[in-house]
Image (spheres, grey):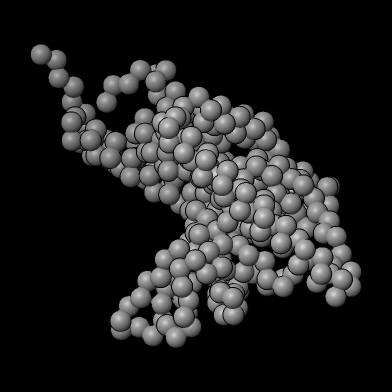
């Protein structure tokens, strides 16, 4: 039987002779990548755009091919949605009439909102950090810290970084992001803390009387609804309750957003 | 661990593609798999994710996680080799 014997020093050495060279190359590579990102921030996003678009198309195709629900369930869901649609249409007509009356009372002080329509290239859960990558940048008029709106004009986040033809949108639900808002019909002021994946958490005094289903709004235009309270966690030893909120806009399925100029 | 060279390359390429296509949680699993065949790979994938998605708010978690996986897989590979030989 052939046996190979290695010198003790080389056998027990944790880092072999080639490893330092690999580490130096790695550090240099990281430096180069970071330098490119700092100097020309949009380069990598521009290169990656076809890959993101291909990924979105692939995901959509797979979603159409594989369905995990039965036909009867889909039919009942369709019926429920049709009935909900009828109710919402009636409600919408009522609200439109109210808006018309209020506009007549206030005058035409609400200027038409102008925005930049942007396609979402990457979204959670593919993109970590609760960010969206959109295909409009500084060349198209997007500015840093501009407000971003989802379907139906629901506020979803702000532009956090910008390149020539792309921009990063940090969602209000990103971990570590705190946003001032209101809860309920009486507009109780709260600070919404992002918990990631589109979720929010906040706390109010027990005496505030917040209930499940109360609407959460953001200041601006008299309060823009962004979601509803889904869960209230009460601790007998604490004077406050923790509120979980579900946003109206699902960041996982966003395809288009509007960026304010 | 005996893995065909094409399979090694395939795992690494898949982990890179996953940054663009698959959910972040699956990318993490593929980072671990690629780290087992080539320890620096998770670090590169983490850097790629941060270059594409990091918005400058908080720590660049993807790079840090990639670095952590790389260090662990590097240590495991060396430890296993030393003990077997």
Q: How many marks?
A: 0
- Which one is nearer the viewer's eye here, A8 or A213? A213
Q: Residue A20 falls in which quadrant of the image?
A: top left
- Image vertical order of residue A55 relative to residue A171, above or below: above
Q: Residue at x 59, y 80 (%)?
A: A186
Q: Residue A248 falls in which quadrant of the image?
A: bottom right
- Image vertical order of residue A137 relative to residue B41, above or below: below
Is residue A205 in view from this perspective? no
Q: Which quarter of the rendering shows the N terminus of chain A? A: top left
- Image vertical order of residue A207 relative to residue A196, above or below: below
- Which one is nearer the viewer's eye here, A85 or A19? A85
Give left or right: position of A20 versus A261.
Answer: left
Q: Which quarter of the rendering shows the C terminus of chain A? A: bottom right
Q: Residue at x 18, y 31 (%)?
A: B84
**x and y percent of residue A203 in the render?**
46, 76
Give left or right: position of A11 versus B21.
Answer: left
**x and y percent of residue A43 in the render?**
71, 41
């Amino acid at each position: 039987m052939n046996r190979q014997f290695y010198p003790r020093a080389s056998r027990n050495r944790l880092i072999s002779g080639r490893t330092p060279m690999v580490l130096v190359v790695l550090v240099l590579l990281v430096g180069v990548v970071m330098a490119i990102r700092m100097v020309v921030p949009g380069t990598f996003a521009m290169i990656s755009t076809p890959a993101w678009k291909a990924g979105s198309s692939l995901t959509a195709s797979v979603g159409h091919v594989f369905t995990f629900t039965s036909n009867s369930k889909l039919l009942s869901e369709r019926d429920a949605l049709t009935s909900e649609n009828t109710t919402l249409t009636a409600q919408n007509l009522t609200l439109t009439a109210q808006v018309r009356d209020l506009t007549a009372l206030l005058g035409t002080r609400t200027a038409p909102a102008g925005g930049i329509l942007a396609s979402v290239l990457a979204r959670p859960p593919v993109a970590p950090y609760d960010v969206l990558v959109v295909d409009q940048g500084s060349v198209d008029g997007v500015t840093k810290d501009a407000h971003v709106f989802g379907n139906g004009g629901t506020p979803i986040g702000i532009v956090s970084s910008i390149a020539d033809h792309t921009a990063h949108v940090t969602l209000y639900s990103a971990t570590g992001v705190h946003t001032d808002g209101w809860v309920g019909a009486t507009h109780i002021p709260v600070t919404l803390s992002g918990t990631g994946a589109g979720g929010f958490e906040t706390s109010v005094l027990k005496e505030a009387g917040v209930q499940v289903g109360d609407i959460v709004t953001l200041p601006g235009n008299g309060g823009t609804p962004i979601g509803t309270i889904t869960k209230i966690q009460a601790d007998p030893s604490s004077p406050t309750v923790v509120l979980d909120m579900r946003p109206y806009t699902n960041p996982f399925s966003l395809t288009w957003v509007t960026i304010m100029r | 661990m005996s893995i065909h060279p094409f399979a090694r390359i395939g795992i690494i390429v898949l982990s890179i593609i996953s940054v663009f296509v698959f959910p972040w949680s699956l990318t993490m699993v593929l980072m671990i798999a690629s780290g087992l065949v080539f320890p620096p790979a998770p670090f590169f994938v983490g850097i790629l994710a941060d270059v594409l998605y990091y918005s400058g708010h908080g720590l660049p978690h993807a790079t840090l996680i990639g670095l952590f996986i790389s260090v662990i897989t590097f240590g495991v590979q060396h430890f296993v080799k030393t003990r077997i030989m």
